Image: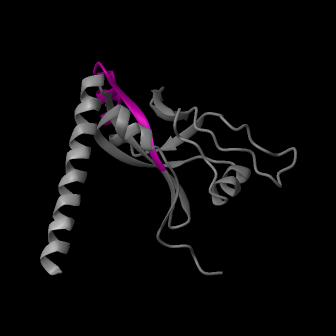
Amino acid sequence: MPRETGRKLIAQNKRARHDYIIEDTYEAGMVLTGTEVKSLRQGRANLTEGYAVVRDGEVWLQNVHIPEYSQGTWTNHAAKRERKLLLHRREIDRLIGKTNERGLTLIPLSLYFKDGRAKVEIGVARGKKLYDKRRDLAEKQAKREIARAMSYAVRRRGA
C-alpha cells in the first residue's frame, strides 16, 4: 500500500482570524485513538470553540469536537475529550513564556493530515477589539472594490 503524501485539510477555524490577531503559529502532532483518526479521515471535526493550554510542561487541546466514528462500537471516543499535543521542548518553553504574557492565548487554526499523520496548527493569538474587527472588515471591502474596479477597467480596455 503506497504511503500517503501531501497535506489534506480536515477542518479550518475561519472565525479565529476574525476574532484574534495571530502573532505566531506552530504545527503540532496529536495523540489520538483509532476511532478519532477514522472520524477525521471522513473529514469531520469542529475547531470553533477549541483552545490549547500548557499544563505541567505539556500542551493540551481542549473543546475540539471530533464526532464519534459512525461504525464504531463500544470502543468509540468521547467527542470533546482533551487531546495531548506533541511539540518539541523548545517550542513548549516558548509557548509557556508567551501564554504567561497578559492577553495571549493558544487557538487551533486548522486540522489536517500531513504525510498520513494528523496535525493541528495552533496560533498564539491576542483578542481583537470591536474597532479592530470593523477596520479589518472595511479594509477587506475596500480591497474587493479596488479589484472589481480594476477588472472592469481591464475588460473595458480590452473590448
At x 29% / y 29%, what residue is drawn? Answer: 98
Pick whichever, 68 or 85, lies toward us: 68
Q: Position of residue 127 (x, y in %)?
A: 33, 26
Q: Quadrant of residue 68?
A: top right
At x 25% / y 52%, what residue is drawn? Answer: 144
Pick whichever, 125 or 16, lies toward us: 16
Q: Residue furthest top?
A: 102
The magenta stretch spans residue 31: no
Can residue 71 be seen? Answer: yes
Residue 149 located left or right of residue 41: left
Residue 17 located left or right of residue 34: left
Q: Quadrant of residue 136?
A: top left
Q: Position of residue 115 (x, y in %)?
A: 50, 67
Could you tell me which quadrant the C terminus lies in? bottom left
The correct choice, above or below, for 151 with respect to 102 in the image is below
Can residue 129 be seen? Answer: no
Q: Quadrant of residue 116?
A: bottom right
The magenta stretch spans residue 97: yes
At x 23% / y 59%, what residue is drawn? Answer: 148
Q: Residue furthest left?
A: 157
Could you tell me which quadrant the N terminus lies in? bottom right
Q: Residue furthest right?
A: 74
The correct choice, above or below, for 12 with respect to 148 in the image is above
Q: Position of residue 131 (x, y in %)?
A: 25, 24
Pick whichever, 96 or 108, lies toward us: 108
The mark total stands at: 0
Q: Position of residue 112 (x, y in %)?
A: 51, 56
The stretch of residues the image draws in magenta is 94-110
Instruction: Tell me the colour scheme of the image.
Output: one colour
At x 65% / y 34%, what residue is drawn? Answer: 81
The correct choice, above or below, for 100 with respect to 70 in the image is above
